[in-house]
């Protein structure tokens, strides 16, 4: 008798101030769906957030722009709103990951991802990094390389401040976001087996 495996449920909870982070969230979603997950977007600043979906998700991917070296205020509010879930350890043993966007190549994005990873750890979640070697870090590299910003802990994107979300971040960052979505979908499948 063969087991029928159900597709993992992935929730991508994000805040986007100017549309760039939402565009990256769409690419994360695409990667998760293509890897066979049931994936859903949740806006962190939506008053009608789907807490039930977050409760039944196998994995939660967090996304926020980096503002002043941190998650946005709206995303931090979502973090604080999860305190009842934390008190009951409702997300314990779920897979977690994160992504962030800023206008600068650095922009102190690492601090935002560390903040997300600590948040996930407090919830008892299992953090999964990007899993891609850095691109664009040698004379033969290119801005078109996957993981062009060179992050390990999560996915970083860079979007020029004077360009809209229809142009920025560039395609390399969207490819990297799709890789993150697929990686988390596959990690959730393995973790739940």
Image: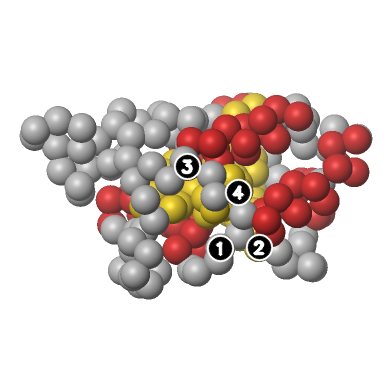
Task: Measure the alpha-carbon separation of dots 3 and 2.
Answer: 20 Å
Of the two numbered discs 3 and 2 on the same chain, state the one appearing first in sequence: 2
CA neighbours of label 1 inside 10 A, class few (<14), some (14 to 19), many (20+): many
Q: Which label is found at residue 109?
A: 3
Q: Which label is found at residue 43?
A: 2
Which residue sits at x=65%, y=27%?
A: 126
Which residue sits at x=31%, y=28%?
A: 133
Task: Measure the alpha-carbon separation of dots 4 and 2.
Answer: 14 Å
Q: Nearer the viewer, mark 1 or mark 4?
A: 4
- Residue 18 screen position, x and y as percent: 50, 69
Which residue sits at x=35%, y=31%?
A: 132
Of the two numbered discs 3 and 4 on the same chain, state the one appearing first in sequence: 4
Q: Nearer the viewer, residue 38 or 43?
A: 43
Task: Measure the alpha-carbon separation of dots 3 and 4.
Answer: 9 Å
Q: Which label is found at residue 71?
A: 4
Q: Nearer the viewer, residue 176 or 34?
A: 176
């Amino acid at each position: 008798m063969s087991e029928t495996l159900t597709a993992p449920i992935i929730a991508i909870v994000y805040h986007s101030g100017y549309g760039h982070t939402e565009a990256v969230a769409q690419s994360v979603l695409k990667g998760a769906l293509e890897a066979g997950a049931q994936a859903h977007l949740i806006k962190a600043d939506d008053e009608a957030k789907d807490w039930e979906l977050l409760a039944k998700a196998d994995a939660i991917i967090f996304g926020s722009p980096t503002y002043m070296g941190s998650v946005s205020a709206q995303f931090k509010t979502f973090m604080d709103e999860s305190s009842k879930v934390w008190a009951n350890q409702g997300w314990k043993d779920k897979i977690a990951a994160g992504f962030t966007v800023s206008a600068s190549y650095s922009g102190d994005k690492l601090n935002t991802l560390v903040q997300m990873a600590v948040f996930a750890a407090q919830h008892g979640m299992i953090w999964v990094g990007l899993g891609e070697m850095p691109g664009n870090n040698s004379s033969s590299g290119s801005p078109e390389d996957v993981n062009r910003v060179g992050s390990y802990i999560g996915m970083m994107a860079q979007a020029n401040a004077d360009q809209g979300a229809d142009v920025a971040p560039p395609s390399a960052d969207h490819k990297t976001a799709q890789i993150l979505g697929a990686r988390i979908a596959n990690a959730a499948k393995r973790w739940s087996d």
